[in-house]
Amino acid sequence: MLEIRDLHATVEGTEILKGINLTINPGEVHAIMGPNGAGKSTLSSVLAGRDGYEVTQGTITFEGQDLLEMEVEDRARAGMLMGFQYPVEIPGVKNIYLLKSALNAQREARGEEEIPSPEFMKLVKEKLEFMRMDTSFLQRAVNEGFSGGEKKRNEILQMLVLQPKLALLDEIDSGLDIDAMKTVSHGVNSLRSENRSILLVTHYQRILNHIEPDQVHVLIDGRIARSGDKQLALRVEDEGYEWIHQESAA
Amino acid sequence: MSTETFLQHLQERVEQGAPEWLTSRRQSAAESFARQGFPSPRQEAWKYTDVSRIAESRFTLASDAALSEARLAALRLQVDDAHRLVFVDGLFSAEHSDIGELPAGVVVEPLSQALMQGREVLGSQLGRLTGEDFSPFAALNTAFAHEGVLLHLGRNAVLEKPVYAIFVSRTGESAVMSHPRLLIRAEQGSEASLIEHHIGEHEAANFTNVVGEASLDANARVRHYKLQEASQSEYHVSSMHIDQQRDSLYASYNLNLGGALVRNDLISELNDENATTEFWGLFFGQERQHIDNHTQVNHNAPRTYSNESYKGILGGRARGVFNGRVYIKRDAQQVRGYQNNANLLLSDRAEIDTKPELEIYADDVLCSHGATTGQLDENAIFALRARGISQEMARGLLTLAFATEVMEQIPLAEITERVERTVAGKLPDRFNLMGVVEDSDA
Amino acid sequence: MATEEMEQLVQREYKQGFVTDIESDTVPPGLDESVIAFISHKKGEPQWMLDWRLEAFHQWQTMKAPSWAHLDYPPIDYQAISYYSAPKKPEDGPQSLDEVDPKLLETYEKLGIPLHEQAALAGVAVDAVFDSVSVTTTFKETLAEAGVIFCSISEAIRDYPELVQAYLGSVVPRGDNFFAALNSAVFTDGSFVYVPEGVECPMELSTYFRINAANTGQFERTLIVCDKRAQVSYLEGCTAPQRDENQLHAAVVELVALEDAYIKYSTVQNWYPGDEDGKGGIYNFVTKRGDCRGDRSKICWTQVETGSAITWKYPSCMLRGNDSVGEFYSVAVTNGRQQADTGTKMIHIGKNTRSTIVSKGIAAGRSNQSYRGLVKMTPRATGSRNFTQCDSLLIGDQCGAHTFPYQEIGNSKSTVEHEATTSKIGDDQLFYCQSRGISEEDAVNMIVNGFCKDVFQELPMEFAVEAEALLGVTLEGSVG
């Protein structure tokens, strides 16, 4: 599904990622943790295709395609969708318009017809219900005046409607109260399937109690310093990152 | 109209030994004034302000600066820890002035003395920012340029005490005109404050026509407080021209309480990155006062900033005008410009004409402006009444509160107290705040 | 997104250039009393109408073209213009849609314009289109039943002289301004609507339903009168690019609303804007004014302006009646070398009058756009309110957006609020849409439509859909 090989990236001339290697197979859920400044958000940004991040070395392959050569919208259409840490507000653009445009763009890329409106509404309403969101939400402008929790739920709703092959969730849990986190996790867990993968980038172990990862990677100083299963996350939660530092130095 | 009547006095002021550059600059300014004539309301910039009362009057030039200590003391602010210059009807009064000690690299002088000293800065500064045709009034000022204030700050010079320039307009047998010139040259890293205080004796009916030019080099900081408390019969016209280099700050606090007919122009040129202009204004008109404030901020370079807030309170048959313009030059990206004008009308015969303009030629900018005119918040009045305060008193208090946003910006208590007292004391009887804010106008 | 890309994105060419090879029955260029007499005679007008025109002409001769607008165009030689051309004969135009430029039809298609209207717009002889005739006949019957008069201004002068005499020039006097005076002297076409007391007009009236609307004319004159408690919604223009061989347009629209009447006037203007260098576009100098004469009357102007090289237009409301309401909703899009100076005037005269102004300006390319508005509260207009929201969006760094709001407040019991912002489409907003798989072009389109939402929701439904599509076509670029 996703294959990152020896990825180096710089921001304004400073090297932040210093050789990342990561393989995510279909059906797997991976979590990347790490202290502040380790390069988590840089990795997310490079995957999402943001400007200002220069890949100086290495490759990223998504479903056999060179991800770094793909435009932002093409990544989404090909099935790699990003859930943002800080979803932007877009005044005046209704959520329902965004959802429909995005879904149709994806279908068009696959050579399919536009989705008929009744079918679309049925789909969206079903997902809304699942996310415990009111239908009035569809008529509101994208993220405008949303609370932090609402914004995150909106990100997951988009995932549920657009059904990506690979969902990247960047700090999806930060700033959420426990109820909102349960709803968000519930949504993410419903995405789990044999041929879909999920990559969680997170600062906190807490969310991993709700979304159980197959693999946990600890990112330190631009490299994956250690990989393991859920136990690794628990140990980090208890002991911090210092021990990994020391062990890798040793 | 009658530009000749104004220029006929020019001969009286031609002093011996004026430098050649000044004589020729005055000469061409006089020509420009005659060419432009007085503005008519048909000109967009003068649409709401008719200056024919000035044009049709006759003014002479004052011949002496006599003023008793008591008369001055009754008018001036008690700002004692300052470099003080006093002008009476446009003439410098050495007797009342006390410039005091100045740090190295700083010149504070009346313009007439600076001319005698042959200060080089004058030649490069005078008229540099006004040009010749900015307005007929500015040209008239240049034609008569003779007296005023020179503030020259050398590199990294910091003037801790403010410069306090007092312009007194006397009651006299015949109306006089004066043309004070303010020249500010702030070199890199320098810093100073200027208080420009116009005061008039009761019923003084003179014409004060001020022009100021301020050049701020990199990282210079100048705060300019103007408190205009002319009599209700005075004509007051002024223009202030500001030129700013990178990282500089110019903050203007333009407080207009007096005058029969007042017109202020403020123009700032932001010429390099991170230069910031702040324009704060308050105008308070009563009876038949006419107060017109025109401001213009020209963002000529990327990443320059401006912030402007003008508040107007108008009662009686007073008329207020606000015209604020924010201009952003092509390619001046990432500019932030904010402008706001809020007005309060206390009487049905008062009028406000406001025009906040944006003229924008760059796309990556954030600009906003707003203008509101309205009444006091009835909910707030209710809240005060619920605490036992009378309706009238509540209105008075809220009117004063309306001015607070601007007043809060001013760190000099002498100025804010004076303004509060004047506003409180001149509110219509029904809002009278005597006893709440001590009356100083007696 | 890089500026060049953005520029590319908004670059577009007008889908249909001028068609100049159509012959017409014209008077020689120039304007004097004999030309006016010729026009009046051709129209079969009574003497009083000719006198009225001549009076306007004499006033015009003493006037100068206004120069205060933020517009830059060469002086117009009014003696080089021909002031009358006879209506086109059916055989001059294309005989069927097959003869029409396929690109034009493609644009119509994108805008979702029905086939029979496509034909009318493209100048296909209307008689050949059966649909149109039957539609026209049906709607004439419906209006007649309700007692609504809807006809050309020329017919009205002939058939309803007392109504025309009572109201023509009563809102926009002959000498109101240079262009209004010119129009008063030489107008040749336009619409007349009268809705009698208590009648709610049973259908939306639209200029291009009118049979002679295919040639909407250079000096249009429209007069709409709504009697007490009457209501009408009037649609002017259409989203489709319109051809016209006349460069100068100077229309006058007068609206009169008596007690409790409501007039909604919606415009979509998409005249030819000129080529990339700004050559050849329409100069559009329009005087539109509504008079809320009766108490509790209401006039609402809604406009979507995307065409013309020069636009000079300030649909206004005179709020005379107590408790009367004026509204102005505007979207203006300029691109290429277009220049628009547009806005509104709300003159509050009656007590407790209310006005709302929502103006959205989008400037792209090398265009310049100004909002110019006046809100005036006279001393009598106590208890009145105005709210103005005025936003500009800039696309590209070679355009300009300006705001010149005038407020003249003469009483202490009114509230006037004005808010304005200028911004650009945020890169982060585009990125967000793109990361959902939406192309840059569609993202710009969605954001622009969102920006204009407050105005579109004021448009009649059929117009609203077309207007959204129009913005899409307008901002369609060469990307991809």
Image (cartoon, coloured by chain):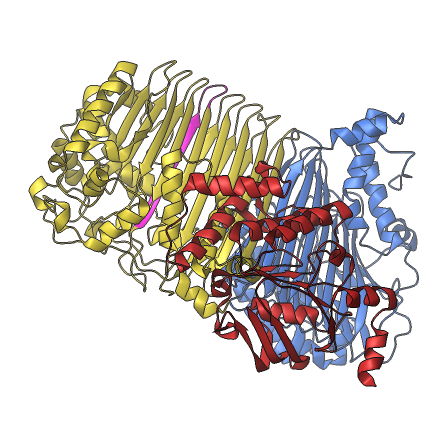
Residue C130 in view (yes/no): yes
Q: Residue at x 65, y 28 (%)?
A: C413
In the image, is B366 to the left or to the right of A214?
left
Q: Residue at x 14, y 33 (%)?
A: C130
The single residue placed furthest to the left in the displayed view is C91
The single residue placed furthest to the front in the displayed view is A194
Give the number of callouts. Answer: 0
| Along the line of sight, the residue nearer the viewer: A35 or B297 | A35
In this picture, is C32 found above or below C434? above
In the image, is B416 to the left or to the right of A199?
right
- Give the image location of residue B61, x and y in percent: 70, 58
| Along the line of sight, the residue nearer the viewer: B59 or C243 | C243
Chain with colour red in the figure: A
In the image, is C98 to the left or to the right of C190?
left
Q: Which residues are magenta?
A: C283-297
Query: Does the segment drawn in magenta span residue C295?
Result: yes
Q: Residue at x 22, y 29 (%)?
A: C152
Query: Does the segment drawn in magenta span residue C43?
Result: no
Chain with colour blue in the figure: B
- Give the image location of residue A85, x and y in percent: 67, 59
In the image, is C39 to the left or to the right of C430?
left
Chief SS of the magenta region: strand
Colour of chain C, in one word, is yellow
**In the figure, residue C138 lies in which quadrant?**
top left
- Give the image location of residue B174, x and y in percent: 71, 49
The single residue placed furthest to the bottom in the displayed view is A250
In this picture, is B304 found above or below B171? below
| Along the line of sight, the residue nearer the viewer: C77 or C300 | C300
In this picture, is A26 found above or below C106? below
Residue B428 in view (yes/no): no
**In the figure, residue A231 lies in which quadrant?**
bottom right
Instruction: Report the quarter where the C terminus of chain B lies.
Output: top right
